[in-house]
Image: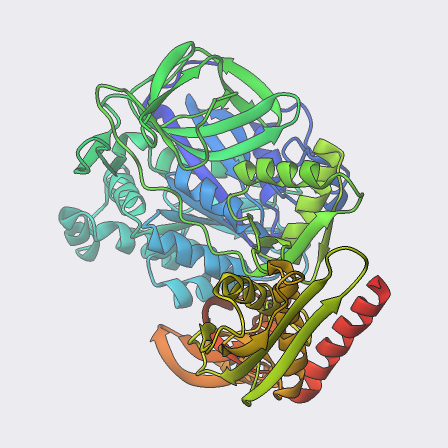
Amino acid sequence: MKDYQSADIRNVAVVGHGKTGKTSLLEACLYNAGANKRLGKVDDGTSTLDFEAEESKRKMSINATLAITEWNNTKINFIDTPGYPDLVGEVLGGLAAADIALLIIAAPNGIEVETEKIWATAEELKKPRAFFINKLDREHADFNKVINDLRAKYGPNVVPMQIPVGSEASFKDVIDLLTSTDDSVEEAKGWLIEAAAEFNDELMEKYFEGEELDPKAVQDALNLGIASAQIFPVFCGSAAQNIAIKNLLDGIVAHFPSPIRTKKSGTNPKTDEPVWRKSADPFSAQIFKTMVDPFVGRLSYMRIFSGDMKADSTYMLANSNGSERVGSLFTMQGKKQITETIAHAGDIVVVAKLAAAKTGDTLCDPKSPIVYEKISYPEPMLTMSVSSAKKGEEDKVFSSIVKQQDEDPTITLRKDPETKETIIAGIGEVHLDILSEKIQRKFGVQMKLGEPRIAFRETIRKALKVEGKHKKQSGGHGQYGHVWIEISPKNPGEGNEFVETIFGGSVPRQYIPAVEKGTQETLAQGVIAGYPVVDMKVNLFDGSYHPVDSSEAAFKMATSIALKKGILQASPILLEPIEEITVHAPESYMGDIMGRLNSKRAKILGMGSIGKNVSEIKALIPMSELYKYATDLRSLTQGRGSYSLKFAHYEPMPEKLAEKIIEEHKKASEDKD
């Protein structure tokens, strides 16, 4: 491949709702640019970009994929991203590497949920945006309606660059508004020129005075608006019918920003002071994606923000003050590697087998250190227990998941110290299903997902005195321990307390630590349902001993007997963990969300508006009611809702629900015996 300088590179993240034809559009771009000899199709499995087994099976993109195209002496780095909401991590990585987001809209469907969400994310990142209205050949495709909806939703600076010729089955071509002299497109052309004129006073003056405009001045003003994320051009066509794809490629080269304009901020890791990088500055790059291959190892996709990157070189890993040896340097056409020896600022490259660098890390010239801010990913909402489907392969399953975390930072894995379960969290059910398929294919192990155990607590509601005696004689030394203890409830959250008020040596001093240890162990194991007993005071006030047969072990046993008996008599109850949940969603869904929360025993704390058409509900909700709430909320809000959790406190569980858990524990204990 030709050596492209920064000014001749375009980095485009292709984003949008699922099934809008993002991958099909890029297959058409590759075909028209001569990169592929045939037009790849997603549905028949011939796609260059959807090459993984899970993608072929589901007929949808799962990974962000790099596709390079050469057009009009320009290198276009396309990043094809998934449209399914569970795979948002791939989209965020693609946006971090690109200079512009190209949102694909299916003409028959118009603006859909993921279009709205990605627009909002790109707006937050101040990322330039453009649109491509696809599937204009389909039934119910209405270009004018989509344009009017876009302008109504996102403002008058959403401007068409092209107008379709024909509609639905008769759609055959597009008219370029910048060059057209056709009177029938005068209104749309006026929108375009008015938007561009905002960035050139002379142009605006000439336009309103009806003077002839210099096409170059219009284009320059337009490009300035696009690069500053203030003008949002709209292209159109049909990927499936290969109509107007060359026009789109022309538009990308002519109007999309080149990375030579990029100025990126970071931090000097040695001084913590803010620093900036322009394309001409010393080398720096950030990893925006990692692919894990059991045979090749890790492939690190990185965007170069400044300077040149060369093969067979060593660079600083600024996040850890270490270094990384870069061997081969290449770019990717789907899964096909294309070797490069040097890449310039603004380009996207791939490096294999970096020792320590992970997604979000910065590589740079050691003489000019910089760390770029990590890519921000959403918190995973769906939590499940994970284990091995096959006994004895637990370590293999967990190590495989850890490797996949390099590839997908939206997955978390932790060990719950209370329930002893390993807990995995992801964005949604499809996300975790895909993860399961991937690790089975890549590493030959199968994980098993389930509902996580809840870390309940036990406590008592009344005080009483109780005796515990352990006496055993079986030849030789016997065992003898005898205690009287008083148990009493404490205030919620105060914890457990052990005291002793022994008088007259009824329990010798050397055995009191054994009684305390027996108390701690028994309370930790639980009595009514196998969960820790909390907020209880234990007072050892009397007992007896045998000069020969008493021992620490005997007193521990006597303590356990007393506590188990006493707790069962002291009105024991089960406590459940309560989370504070914060739900964000458009106002129109708030009634349904509140109704569903009420059905899950939630206590609404408040509701308010937090932005344009976005409301917030805060509530207290039992953790046991939250299993698969991520799926529930997505269904209620058509994917527009999100939530976060924060532990609040423990409170008594309703008696009927508690009885069921206690009964299950009792049955499990009997089965074990």
**Number of marks in the rendered image:** 0
299 left or right of 56 in image: left
**210 shown above or below 659:** above
In percent of width and height, residue 631 lies at 63, 66
From the viewer's side, name the closer residue of 147 and 466: 466
Determine the residue positioned at 45% across, 33% down. 358
- Residue 355 visible in the snapshot: yes
Determine the residue positioned at 44% across, 83% down. 491
Determine the residue positioned at 53% across, 56% down. 380
Location of residue 320 (image quadrant): top left
In percent of width and height, residue 259 lies at 32, 32
From the viewer's side, name the closer residue of 521 and 11: 521
From the viewer's side, name the closer residue of 73 and 458: 458
Q: Quadrant of the C terminus?
A: bottom right
- Residue 46 visible in the snapshot: no
In percent of width and height, residue 168 lies at 65, 56
126 left or right of 302 in image: left
**220 shown above or below 429:** above
Location of residue 562 (image quadrant): bottom right
In percent of width and height, residue 539 lies at 49, 78
Determine the residue positioned at 52% across, 51% down. 88
